[in-house]
């Protein structure tokens, strides 16, 4: 009898060993094998506080894993079922369940690009943010025009216009507006060198005035070769006490402007319209790129006082009013 019991025990042990080995093999095969080696990447948003069982179901329904029960078991065995962090992740069925879980536990959320072109205004940037879905555009506008926020970022104005450096940024979904503003201003500050600050002092201008002038240059021309020439016109006019008479300043802040500048625009009384005020406008009218900032700091050495657009990109520069009138007659139906 004892021998029979012993024999049955051996057989049972063998069966259990084989079964355990089979389960272990299946577990490892599931854990380390990708469901689809050619699977595309998809965005998966894991809500805060979501139970791990719901996460496993979500991954299964998205076609990323095929055995949610085994996925949950593997996560529990490795003590990773409570390590998942909320957020949006870029995942693929070409990743093994092990790699997918490691990604979810790492907190390496998906980043979205935010492309800000040179010369965009604060309002245009807010519109780009709204279209991207990365952040709250209304919160961005509010913070960017809050004097307390400006003071926090050491910007001597009521708005951060001019300091939101045009560039390509990468942010996760639901990034706070303040984080976006901080990244843009830090990028702006990183572009400034001691030599540039010293050059502003040499010109007798504050950094804020340089940024304001650079924003005008940015809006006047997109041609690199012309930036320093446009800058020379503005610098020359400032030295002579002439009004700058820059068209983009006349339409800054005017809503529903379709791009056509009219005589009414030029005659509008605003603190930015350099047809009506002396010197620089109240502040920047856009966010300039580095090329325009450099042009504001290092104008070409010319005696130009006027320029007029020849086409959509290029300008004709003149030294005298007579030359300018001739250029206007050739390239515009009206001017000034």
Image (spheres, grey):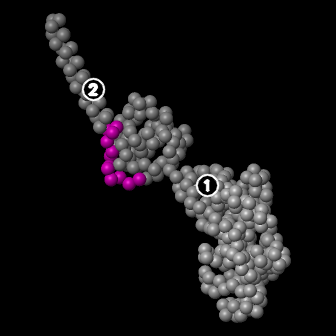
Please say whether residue 34 is one of the residues in the magenta stretch: yes
Where does label 2 land, which residue?
20
Identify the image quadrant of residue 115: bottom right
Tell me the magenta residue range.
Answer: 30-41
| Magenta span main SS | loop
Q: Is residue 188 above or below residue 259?
A: above
Q: Is residue 101 above or below residue 190?
A: above
Crowd band around label 2 with a 10 angstrom C-alpha radius: few (<14), some (14–19), many (20+): few
Q: Nearer the viewer, residue 66 or 113?
A: 113
For the C terminus, the quadrant is bottom right
| Horizontal arrangement in the rendering, residue 311 relative to residue 240 (left or right) | left
Q: Of helix, strand and loop, which one carries label 1?
A: loop
Say which label, 2 or 1, has the lower sequence index. Answer: 2
For the N terminus, the quadrant is top left
Q: Of helix, strand and loop, which one carries label 2?
A: helix
Res 251 seen here? no
């Amino acid at each position: 009898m004892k021998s029979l019991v012993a024999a049955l025990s051996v057989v049972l042990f063998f069966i259990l060993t084989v079964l355990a080995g089979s389960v272990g093999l299946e577990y490892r095969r599931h854990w380390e094998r990708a469901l689809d080696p050619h699977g595309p990447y998809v965005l998966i948003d894991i809500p805060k506080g979501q139970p791990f069982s719901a996460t496993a179901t979500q991954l299964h329904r998205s076609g990323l894993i095929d055995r949610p029960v085994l996925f949950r078991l593997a996560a529990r065995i490795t003590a990773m079922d409570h390590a998942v962090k909320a957020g949006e992740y870029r995942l693929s069925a070409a990743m093994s369940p092990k790699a997918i879980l490691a990604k979810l536990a790492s907190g390496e959320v998906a980043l979205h690009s935010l492309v800000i072109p040179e010369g965009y205004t604060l309002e245009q940037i807010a519109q780009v943010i709204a279209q991207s879905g990365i952040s709250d555009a209304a919160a961005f506008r509010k913070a960017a025009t809050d004097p307390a926020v400006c003071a926090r970022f050491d910007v001597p104005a009521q708005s951060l216009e001019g300091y939101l450096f045009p560039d390509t940024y990468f942010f996760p979904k639901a990034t706070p507006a303040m984080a976006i503003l901080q990244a843009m201003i830090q990028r702006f500050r990183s572009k400034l060198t001691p030599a540039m600050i010293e050059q502003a002092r040499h010109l007798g201008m504050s950094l804020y005035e340089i940024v304001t002038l650079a924003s005008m240059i940015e809006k006047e021309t997109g041609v690199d070769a012309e930036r320093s020439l446009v800058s020379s016109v503005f610098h020359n006019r400032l030295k002579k006490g002439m009004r700058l008479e820059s068209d983009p300043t006349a339409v800054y802040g005017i809503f529903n402007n379709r791009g056509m500048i009219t005589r009414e625009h030029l005659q509008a009384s605003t603190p930015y319209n350099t047809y009506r005020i002396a010197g620089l406008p109240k502040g920047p009218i856009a966010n300039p790129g580095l090329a325009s900032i450099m042009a504001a700091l290092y104008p070409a050495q010319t005696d130009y006082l006027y320029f007029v657009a020849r086409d959509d990109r290029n300008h004709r520069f003149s030294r005298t009013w007579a030359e300018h009138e001739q250029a206007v007659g050739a390239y515009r139906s009206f001017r000034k």
